[in-house]
Amino acid sequence: MGNYLDKLNPEQRKAVQHINGPLMVIAGAGSGKTRVLTYRIVHLLKNNVSPFNILSLTFTNKAAKEMRNRIETMVGKNISSSLWMGTFHSVFSRILRIESEKLNYPQNFTIYDTDDSKSLIRSIIKELDLDKDIYKVSVVLNRISSLKNNFIRAEQYSNYSELVQSDKIAKRPDFERIYRTYVQRCIKASAMDFDDLLLNTYTLLDNFPDLILKYQNKFQYILIDEYQDTNHVQYLIIKKLAALNENICIVGDDAQSIYSFRGAKIENILNFKNDYPDHASYKLEQNYRSTSTIVNTANSLIDNNENQIKKTVWTENIEGEKIIVCKCYSDSDEGRLVANTIFEIKMREHAFPKDFAILYRTNAQSRSLEEALRKQNIPYKIYGGLSFYQRKEIKDVLAYCRLTINPNDEEALKRVINYPTRGIGNTTLQKLIVTANSEKISIWEVLNNLQGYKHNINNGSCKKLEEFTTLIKSFISQKENRDAYVLTEHIAKTSGVFNDLYNDKSPEGVSRFENIQELLNGLKDFCENTEENLLANYMQDVALLTNQDNEKTEDFNKVTLMTVHAAKGLEFPYVFVVGLEQNLFPSMMAGDSQENLEEERRLFYVAITRAEKRLFLSHTTNRFKWGQYVDCEPSRFLYELDEKYITKTEASIKKPKKSQKQNYFNKYKITKKEENKITVPKGFKKATNIQSKIIPSEINNIQNGMRVKHSKFGSGKIVEISGENINKKATIFFEGVGQKQLLLRFAKLEIIKE
């Protein structure tokens, strides 16, 4: 423990050495707040404070584990293990198990996770014979959670006339019954959900004066990390626990308060000075993470927020390169630009894929980025979520597409036969599977001859199966005369998937609906940029995109794709923030609210401050949304950045003619030749390893063994030539894409002269 104080800068040292009384530490991005919290606990222990009297609260298990490990190396395992350290939920559940009998719970009560809660709500809705399309499980659960965090219990619900009235307007008059039954079932099962862990802890402390005194005496020193992320219940619990000794230390950054949608209250940190007038305050303003250019750019942005604790973050790090702000013409161009730049930096600076992060406002934006990275053969991972094509709603639509191409695809059939719900239960499906297996035929063949097989399925179910079969047959009949975009859009709408997702107004439902829209955007791009635009060709393309076989790199060594929310607390040498457009970032949901707009600005601040060496910002002038191309305006936040720290540029590509803008199908139709003219501006250098001369080809000039270039699949080698005249085909192995068979009269190949 010797010279630990010597490792701290003056402000850090003051915060660590402050022992008694309330303390607020405002820690700017990259200022070493974890070190301050860790060393402060060590300093308390060095000053004869018992580890049993220290309570340290974090928001993630990772943060708690990291702090405990650091402390352990400095004071030993015996002492560190005696600390009350962990997440709010883990610490409070520990208290609840000790005091459980006061709440009429057994000590071994179960903790329900989100899936448990959803399953219970789903059962209750079924038992009460309610419409599950009106009482959507996720919507009901979110509402129950919100009510608990606002101290509105089930037995009190009827007292809030405005809530009862809103239920009637929303045509959910039985919500109260569900809430009451849910609470009763939890109690019956001796279970608490995550919200109960907070609510019941507060109840204990509020209803039992001897108990609050017990824990006030026990927790003589309280430390809270990320205080700006606390909600109302957490705030009240902490205030009660700290009321006797007021030895409370909070660490946080109001400029990184971005979780209001989870109930976080920025007022908790802003009003700390009012709760504890005699508090000491220290600001950690030295940034150890980023270049001075990045730090100063972030400062110029956040200065625009009125509701904040003023500070000036600075750094002794090098100035670094200017921030690149690039204008692109579409999200596809944006994806290619990012992928090319990553490739170039990897080659030029010998960087690893793990050094790069691509940040976006919504998960739906990952599609074009994923496709661009795969075409460059750059390994990536989706942080905090599934790959775009692995998301349930995407897999559901693609299962319909698979079934349209190959109705014998049983996995696809089983996935969608009762989605959206059409009254075909699991019992009926199992009977179909048994029949198919016994007759050694596909389920599809059984469906096409329901009366011919003995399957013991009642007439009502048979009718529903026949309707499903007719639906799939209608899709099959159109697969050769409709392009992939038109047909998939028709499938999504006619199957009911589109409507099912549209009617779910929960945050998760809105996100899923946006993902379907993004899938259609990708299909539109595919159809506009290839002659072979049938659904079968697209499905082959998707199969290549989702194939993980080529990823031989260790999982940790991949480019990271994530939302800005998920990026909080992380850092990367190279950061790309994409989609910086009005109504996307800031979100359309922010509206005209100053409060919401300031949170969106804080979110952008978090994005900027993830970068260590280089920062790239990009926006597009066109995005395909809701069935049409829309013009996009640059984010207002881009105009708030100090211009002396940025370089504005644009991806050079031929603009569409005005005549093309009259029809949304043609509004931004760029030919493949034009697409390949894209140039990477200064700072966004274009990656290419093809130095050879490329010349247009005639069909008859194409020979086995030739190296050729395709506008979509890139460079490759011809493996085989087959067919004659206009039916002449080439089998080509494309680098990073794999083997493709192309009809030469449509392929528009270019020969690469070595």
Image: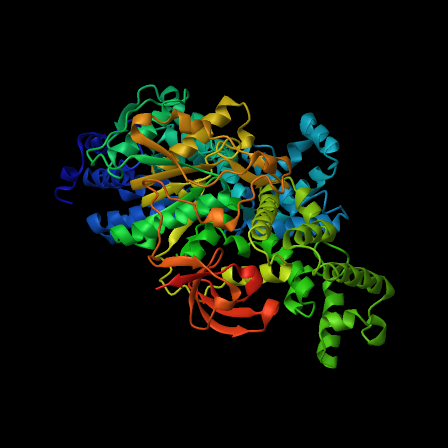
Residue 98 visible in the snapshot = no
Left or right: 15 in relation to 444:
left
Q: Residue at x 73, y 67 (%)?
A: 429
Check the picture and name the quadrant holding the C terminus: bottom left
Q: Residue at x 81, y 60 (%)?
A: 467
Residue 607 visible in the snapshot = yes
Q: Looking at this view, is 623 or 227 the one in front?
A: 623
Left or right: 6 in relation to 693:
left
The image position of residue 585, as x and y in percent, is 48, 34
Q: Residue at x 49, y 64 (%)?
A: 547
Left or right: 529 in relation to 350:
right
Q: Looking at this view, is 664 or 246 the one in front?
A: 664
Decide: is 518 above or below 156. Answer: below
Locate residue 295: give its quadrant. top left
The image position of residue 251, as x and y in percent, is 33, 33
Decide: is 697 above or below 226. Answer: below
Decide: is 375 above or below 163. Answer: below
